[in-house]
């Protein structure tokens, strides 16, 4: 699976944050779900990278 680039991640995070702040209740729920999902992907990716570094 390909993660978004850092720039794409920052854009998506900004977009979802704006949707949470200004969207309808259903838009807010979807945006919160999407934001948690991409943040989780990056957290998992960072943990895998750190684990590989620590194994060296």
Image (tube, helix red, strand yellow):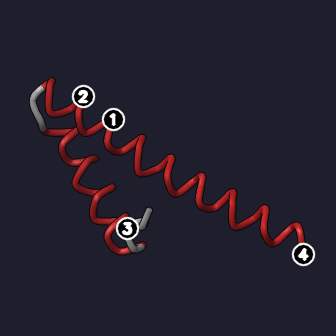
> SS at mark 2?
helix
Q: Is residue 50 above or below residue 31?
A: below
Q: Which residue is mark 4?
A: 56
**10 Å crowding of disc 1: few (<14), some (14-19), many (20+):** few
Question: Which badge, 4 or 1, is on the more N-terminal residue?
Answer: 1
Q: Residue at x 59, y 60 (%)?
A: 45
Instruction: For marks 3 and 4, give the CA distance.
Output: 27 Å
Alpha carbon of mark 4 to alpha carbon of mark 1: how far? 35 Å
Circle 1/circle 2 CB separation < 8 Å: yes
Residue under numbered circle 2: 29
The secondary element bearing badge 1 is classed as helix
Q: How many marks?
A: 4
Q: Quadrant of the C terminus?
A: bottom right
**Residue drawn at point x = 44 percent, y = 62 percent:** 1
Q: Nearer the viewer, mark 2 or mark 3?
A: 3
Residue 49 location, quadrant = bottom right
**Residue sitting nearer the eye, 30 or 17:** 30
**Disc 1 target residue:** 33
Residue position for label 3: 4
Q: Position of residue 20 (x, y in %)?
A: 23, 38
């Amino acid at each position: 699976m390909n993660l978004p680039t850092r720039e794409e991640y920052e854009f998506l995070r900004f977009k979802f944050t704006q949707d949470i702040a200004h969207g309808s209740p259903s838009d807010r729920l979807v945006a919160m779900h999407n934001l948690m999902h991409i943040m989780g992907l990056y957290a998992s990716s960072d943990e895998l990278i750190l684990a590989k570094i620590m194994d060296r």
